[in-house]
Amino acid sequence: MSLGTDLSAWGQAGTVMLLALAVTTGSAPLAWSYKCGNYSWAVAVSSDGRHVIAGSDDMHAYFFSADSAEGKPLWSYMASGYVRHVAISSNGTYAAASDTDGNIFFFRLGVLGHPIWSFRADSPIDALAMTQDGDYLVGGDRKGRVYLFSAEGTGQPLWQGEVPGGVFALSFSQSRVLAVTSSRGGLYFFGELPFRSGYIWIFQEYTSFPQLAMSDDASYIITGGSDGYVYLLWRSGDLADRRRLGGAVSALSLSRATGRAVVGSTNGNASLYAIQDGLATIGSVATHGPLTSASISENGERVSVATLDGVISMFSQSLAATLWTFNTGAVVHSLSMSSDGLVVAAAGDTGNIYLFEEEAHAKKNGVALGIALVSVAVAAFAVAYFVWRRRTILWKTKTGAGKTYHYRHHDHSRGTSSHEAFNGRRSSVRRICCVSVHDHAIARLDV
């Protein structure tokens, strides 16, 4: 490395420090990943970000602690079919999983690896939802039957309803209000359970509704249609608004605390809406492929989407800035995040369960960055010091006999200094100084 004279020594040192900072930003905060024995279809993170449940086509449900350094599950449970749907309470005390053999398994945190009860339907379970406190669970099967369970029960349904066709999606609020969509089309509103034996109203268009979410007080419902429209309905069943995304709606997530929803489609569009008197667009982004999953944090500050090529992208609250991306290399079927958006889990066709944790990543990077900056600062000081030495200890004068070079010599062992003068060509006083940090040469100065 040769030092020019156009930049000051500290200017060069500052450039080195900025380059070091640039290298440390923008990476995905992957905390760990766990490889299942087959495709992974479902994942759910508790609101506090401390626990994760996932399901796989290896016919296992897996339960993790987010704090696990290596991503090893606390326990796993073998089902009798592919585990395609999971749910978890806000604090991780309760969790549930369902399989394609018609089973629903209900777990409690203190009982490792064994359900406290189970239920078997006579067709695959295609939808599962739990209240935030975990006290109630709802499941829907391929024949259109809907079941309500209590956490403290024995696995026998408290209530049972039915919709035509199979259950496509369902949403269950904390106030125990249920909405269900059917594979034959139509959105069915059942009201508060278990006090109703059938649905109160039905909303129909010439389409099906694969995506569904509802506010905690059930004052509004948002649903995504295969026709490419997003529909907002009031609790009364009246249509409040609808917006066209283009392409079938393939992903939807609602922040119940902020009233914001992120919606994605098969044409690669993702839009963020504020739910007020209608759907007010906050921001939108065009991705490079069909969206397969989306999630928004409860505080509305993080939005994550996944595309068909396996790329997960994390955005700011308005979709204006990409915070990080991660390529899994295969389809991501499910995304879930904590209420603050700092913990994100993903599951897909690689069979891996991925956990991203921004806070832990920031702490880890902060330590590494601190060490790097100390090293860079030492190097910068050394460079500046020797450039300063170069400019102050060597000068030349002209006499009748020719050029005279003056050199100040420091004897650190004796603590003395002296001056020497050399006549003749500059090459006769060529001195070389090398600066090293941690045994790596970073500068060579000719004086």
Image (cartoon, grey):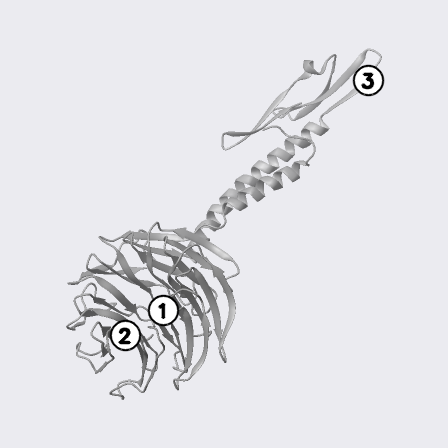
Q: How far apart are marks 1 and 2 (CA)?
A: 12 Å
Residue 326 visible (yes or no): yes
At 47% from the left and 48% from the top, the residue drawn is 367
At 43% from the left and 63% from the top, the residue drawn is 341
Q: Residue furthest front?
A: 206
Query: Could you classify mark 3 by the number of other residues whose Cα lies within 10 Å: few (under 14), some (14-19), or many (20 or more)?
Result: few
Q: In which quarter of the image is the N terminus?
A: top right
Query: Could you classify mark 1 by the number of other residues whose Cα lies within 10 Å: few (under 14), some (14-19), or many (20 or more)?
Result: many
Query: Which residue matches tag 3?
Result: 398
Contact (CB < 8 A) between labels 2 and 3? Answer: no
On residue 184, the disc is 2
- Which badge, 3 or 1, comes first in the chain's sequence? 1
Residue 379 quadrant: top right
Kind of residue at disc 3: Lys
Q: Is mark 1 on a helix, strand or loop?
A: loop
Question: Viewed as shown, does residue 295 lie left or right of 136?
Answer: right
Kind of residue at disc 2: Arg
Residue 105 quadrant: bottom left
Question: Viewed as shown, does residue 321 lie left or right of 154?
Answer: right
Residue 291 quadrant: bottom left
Kind of residue at disc 1: Ser
Residue 107 visible (yes or no): no
Question: Viewed as shown, does residue 270 lie left or right of 381?
Answer: left
* Image location (x, y in percent) of residue 279: 48, 75
Q: What element carries label 2?
A: loop
* Image location (x, y in percent) of residue 251: 38, 65
Position above or below: 201 against 294: below
Position above or below: 331 against 221: above
Query: Which residue matches tag 1?
Result: 226
Q: As rendered, which of 386 and 301 lies closer to the eye?
A: 301
Q: As rendered, which of 406 and 269 lies closer to the eye?
A: 269
Contact (CB < 8 A) between labels 1 and 2? Answer: no
